[in-house]
Amino acid sequence: MIKKPLLEIRSLTTHFLTEDGVVRAVEDVSFDIFPGEIVSLVGESGCGKSVTGLSILKLIPSPPGQIVNGEVFFEGRNLLALEEREMERVRGNEISMIFQEPMTSLNPVFTIGNQIMEAIELHQKIDKKEARQRAIEMLDRVRIPSPEVRIDSYPHQLSGGMRQRAMIAMALSCQPRLLIADEPTTALDVTIQAQVLRLLKEIQREMGMAVILITHDLGVVAEIADRVAVMYAGRIVESGPIESIFGQMRHPYTRGLLESIPQLEEKKKRLNAIPGQVPNPTDLPAGCKFHPRCSLRIDECQKGEPPLFQVQGNHYSRCLRWKECC
Amino acid sequence: MARYLVRRLLYTLITLVGISIISWVIITQAPGSPIAITLDPKVSPKIVEQMEKNYDLDKPIYQQYFLWLKRLFTGNLYSFKDGRPVLDKIGERIWNTLLLNFVSILIIFSLAIPLGIFSARKQYTFFDNLGTFGAYLGISIPSFWLAYLLILGTVKLFGYPVLGMRSFVTEEFSSLEIVMDRLWHLMLPSIILAIGGIAALSRYTRSSMLEVIRQDYVRTAKAKGLPEETVYYKHALRNALLPIVTLFGFLIPGLIGGSIIMETVFSWPGIGRLAYQAVLARDYPVVMTINTISAVLVLIGNFTADMLYAIVDPRIRYQ
């Protein structure tokens, strides 16, 4: 039996109309999320991974942002065609999102309890007392000590890790079927990062929800993701199950990313970096967007955008020379 | 909190003493003397000497200051001009000034904040540009000029007097008519006094709102599924108003300065007009006392603003 995807993204294209020209932040991105799996969107800053996440929930600031093309089917409904009122019922209820900066993502003038209860009361028909009880349960679930006291804390009274836990509690309080986690651990200490990741994975398993994990940290990906989509200049350049990406990558950019992770065992003098710069998003190179930085480039690469080649099963690569690569 | 309060009060008191010393020096050292202004220049030097003695003008300046301070607190301070007790002169007028200023503050806050929010929501639309234009106009137009213009216009249009606090003949008026007459006279000066404040405060509210709208927690609120209105009027507004609260303290000096002009233009029997007349007559005791009262009002305004800030911002409350 073939499982039906929870979320199907088809040709999603998001542009920003700025004074310097059109920034093609997300270009023709398609992928599926199945119930209960963790899919990671990986790439450098500015590759369009966060904009993809925000586009799914239609949280792109507009103007200047605009979703110019594509469909996002969530359980069969095209979210991009929904009215704002209907979209509000999806946000925080069926699809939740958590953000990178726990320091600034919580409102400083309301208690965390107030902010969690707000989401619960909004989407569920329960009274204030029950909502408070639910909020305490959620805080307990994300392992915040003495939640019945902490519920009345203001964000500034909590540490970064605790704030991110409170954010997670808020996002999960209505038991969404999909969580979009935009760099959830980037702003945290390394030790706290591991704790928060483990917590996310645990809750994900208990609740059986799907997660889109947006990160630039391949270590995080290796830790918890089932599938990976690597993005470069607004496009998916390689995607596939985690074993097959880490085992036999088929795109020079993915290889570059993996090689630039410092290895503690090897005593090398210099870090391996990908040569060149991320291209200017208002002025992208023709053909394959990665070719100016690529060691495998051939004349063919400049001629047209390569399609996604099927490597095997659901492993795809957007490289003309994927067979020779890596 | 109590410790903070005590320390804050102490600083306020020191500031007040500083203000009174500096203004004493400035006022007494300004050109012109109370005697030269009231007396005929041909009067004999003996009388001048006698008057200087009466007013303590022959004593060193620091002694004069302490004498003023002592007399103020013992209630023995008399006006140079008519010999009446200064506190009586001020007491019968101060409530008129406070009424005018209170109504102005009310107008400023109730108009400027909604105006600023609306401008921010409609950023760069026709309404917003109109608001920007209006604000610059409101800040740059001299209030006395606008006042005369409006007095002329209103009197021509309605044929009803606007100067003073009330009409002269009110004997046959019913109580409702007396109230209406009072409100009518209050309307023009308080609105003109408020214009500068509305212009400035609505701009502050607008920019504060625009800044807050871009914050991460506003996006979080949206991601929660809250309707746009709740995001705007609960999550954003509450944060945007934090800096606005402190402006309350800055508003008062402007209003006091403004009421000197407005009261003079509108023949409003308040302490602003009294101060103006006292300055012209070099009536030091009156000028100094009104000055001190104004300083106290400003310091109370600042103090209230700080307290309000602590109430609305939990980050300050818990420190």
Image (cartoon, coloured by chain):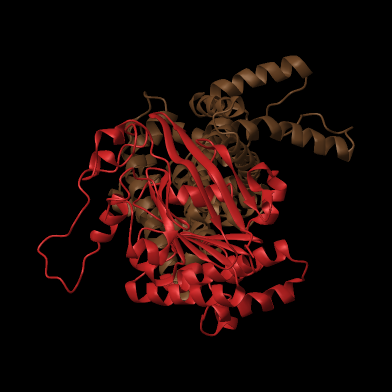
Residue depicted at x 33% and y 72%: A190
Residue depicted at x 67% and y 42%: A81
- Relative horizontal placement of residue B13, taking residue B256 as reference (left or right): left
The vertical placement of B145 against B267, above or below, is: above
Residue depicted at x 60% and y 49%: B91
Q: Position of residue B316 (x, y in %)?
A: 47, 65
Viewer can see residue A2: yes
Instruction: Residue lying at the far top in this picture: please name it.
Output: B156
Residue depicted at x 51% and y 39%: A13
The one of A66 and B179 positioned closer to us in this rendering: A66
Q: Colour of chain A?
A: red
Q: Colour of chain B?
A: brown
Q: Position of residue A4 (x, y in %)?
A: 64, 59
The one of B111 and A45 positioned closer to us in this rendering: A45
The vertical placement of A187 against B166, above or below, is: below
Please tell me in which quadrant of the rendered image residue B197 appears: top right
Instruction: Residue lying at the far left in this picture: please name it.
Output: A269
The vertical placement of B226 against B113, above or below, is: below
Viewer can see residue B244: no
The one of A99 and B105 positioned closer to us in this rendering: A99
Q: Position of residue B137 (x, y in %)?
A: 53, 24
The one of A325 and B259 positioned closer to us in this rendering: A325
Q: Position of residue A232 (x, y in %)?
A: 36, 46
